[in-house]
């Protein structure tokens, strides 16, 4: 995985080739990230052995690629995209573990906090009771934006891999960091989202609008709802954290001095509105997701700068005698 920036906005001195070798060993390119993936793959095997999680095709593929990365060279594309598969496996395992702890989910604390932040109101209840009747057409654009969470990181990562290879490593490092931290919080602090709290009778009616929209497409809304791996994983909102990460990298590549670059912030900010309007998250969940995205971006950028400085040999930096 590439970690040094090679675009026109380099965070540290020293350049790396725009096109890495076609065949590489994953661990020789980025030992830390693949060590983490290997450790998790081993942990996933343990969870399967004790029947804490099920055996999935993604899990089998992850294990096979991890073993190959230890001994065999492969195309750079395969190794660069292995972390995304690792996240998919982790997300599936998470759903099983969080589902088993659903009875311990926090339900009252986020409602009380929301009312403190919003002057006695709950965002989802207020938006669906006031904004939605006045502008029901918002269901479609906000619903589509919410669903971009699944495709946006893949599309953005693919674009970076093809056009800004140096930034691809920064994005993947930050993406893995944000997702892993989010998953850990989900397990340690399961939180019930507004739509589920309403079903429990602790809030007025909150419609899960996304399900209704998808049901217009051949009834796939019920499939989407039933396949949700972590219904009690509301804090933090990764639906906000990943768009925050995307917007910061995109704006950084364009340059923060360009006024148009700041428009990228509309993506995570409107996503916060969408998650509340659709009944999926509280305001604090969105704020936590935004903060997590910023921290993940800054951490990955700092790591890349240090890696770039370490890659500069003394011979290249020494003055000519």
Image (tube, helix red, strand yellow):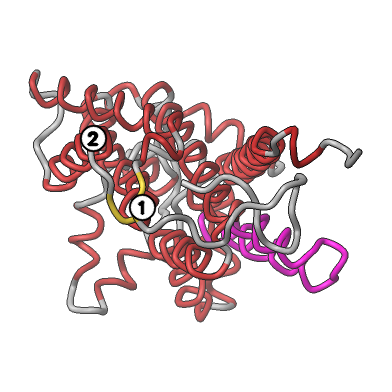
Q: Residues within 10 Å of mark 1 (few under 14, many from 20)?
A: some
What is the secondary structure assignment of the residue under circle 1? Answer: helix
Badge 1 or badge 2: first in the primary sequence: 2
Q: CA distance from mark 1 to mark 2?
A: 18 Å
Which residue is farthest front? Answer: 321
Give left or right: position of 47 versus 305.
left
Residue 128 shows in the view: no
Residue found farthest to the right: 321
Which residue is found at the position 46% from the left and 46% from the top?
1
16 shown above or below 174: below
Q: Position of residue 263 (x, y in %)?
A: 74, 69
User: How would you classify the magenta stretch by its main secondary structure?
Assistant: helix
Between residue 58 and residue 4, name the one nearer to us.
4
Residue 109 appears in the figure: yes
Query: Total marks drawn?
Result: 2
Where residue 36 appears, x then y in whole percent? 38, 28
Of residues 96 and 199, the one drawn nearer to the viewer in this rendering: 96
The residue to which callout 1 is attached is 81
Q: Is residue 260 above or below residue 319?
A: below
Instruction: Please indicate whether residue 108 sits to the left or right of residue 228 in the image.
Output: right
> Residue 260, how many percent across, how many down?
79, 73
Quadrant in which the C terminus appears: top right
Which residue is rendered at x = 44% and y = 45% of the image? Answer: 194
Question: Looking at this view, is 51 or 216 the one in front?
Answer: 51
Q: Nearer the viewer, mark 1 or mark 2?
A: 2
Residue in the picture at 32% in, 47% down: 82
Q: What are the residue bounds of the magenta stretch?
A: 246-275
Mark on residue 71? 2
> Label 2's element?
helix
Instruction: Specify whether residue 258 is painted magenta.
Output: yes
Question: Please, is residue 254 above or below residue 15 in the view?
Answer: below
């Amino acid at each position: 995985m590439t970690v040094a920036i090679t675009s026109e906005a380099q965070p540290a001195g020293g350049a790396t080739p725009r096109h890495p070798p076609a065949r590489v060993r994953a661990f020789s390119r980025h030992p830390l990230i693949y060590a983490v993936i290997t450790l998790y793959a081993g942990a996933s095997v343990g969870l399967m052995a004790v029947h804490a999680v099920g055996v999935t095709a993604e899990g089998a593929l992850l294990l096979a690629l991890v073993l190959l990365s230890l001994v065999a060279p492969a195309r750079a594309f395969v190794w660069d995209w292995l972390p995304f598969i690792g996240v998919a496996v982790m997300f599936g395992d998470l759903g099983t573990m969080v589902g088993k702890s659903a009875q311990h989910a926090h339900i009252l604390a986020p409602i009380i906090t929301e009312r403190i932040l919003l002057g006695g109101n709950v965002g989802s209840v207020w938006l669906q009771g006031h904004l939605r009747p006045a502008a029901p057409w918002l269901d479609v654009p906000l619903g589509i934006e919410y669903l971009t969470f699944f495709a946006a990181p893949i599309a953005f990562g693919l674009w970076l891999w093809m056009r800004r290879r140096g930034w691809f490593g920064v994005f993947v490092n930050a993406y893995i960091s944000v997702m892993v931290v989010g998953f850990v919080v989900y397990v340690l602090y399961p939180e019930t989202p507004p739509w589920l709290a309403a079903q429990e009778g602790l809030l007025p009616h909150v419609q899960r609008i996304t399900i209704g929209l998808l049901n217009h497409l051949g009834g796939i809304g019920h499939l989407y709802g039933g396949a949700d791996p972590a219904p009690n994983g509301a804090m933090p909102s990764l639906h906000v954290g990943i768009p925050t990460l995307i917007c910061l990298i995109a704006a950084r590549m364009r340059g923060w001095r360009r006024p148009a670059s700041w428009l990228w912030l509309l993506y995570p900010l409107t996503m916060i509105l969408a998650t509340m309007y659709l009944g999926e998250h509280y305001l604090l969940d969105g704020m936590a997701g935004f903060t997590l995205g910023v921290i993940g971006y800054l951490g990955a950028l700092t790591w890349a700068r240090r890696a770039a400085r370490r890659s500069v040999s003394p011979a290249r930096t020494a003055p000519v005698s």
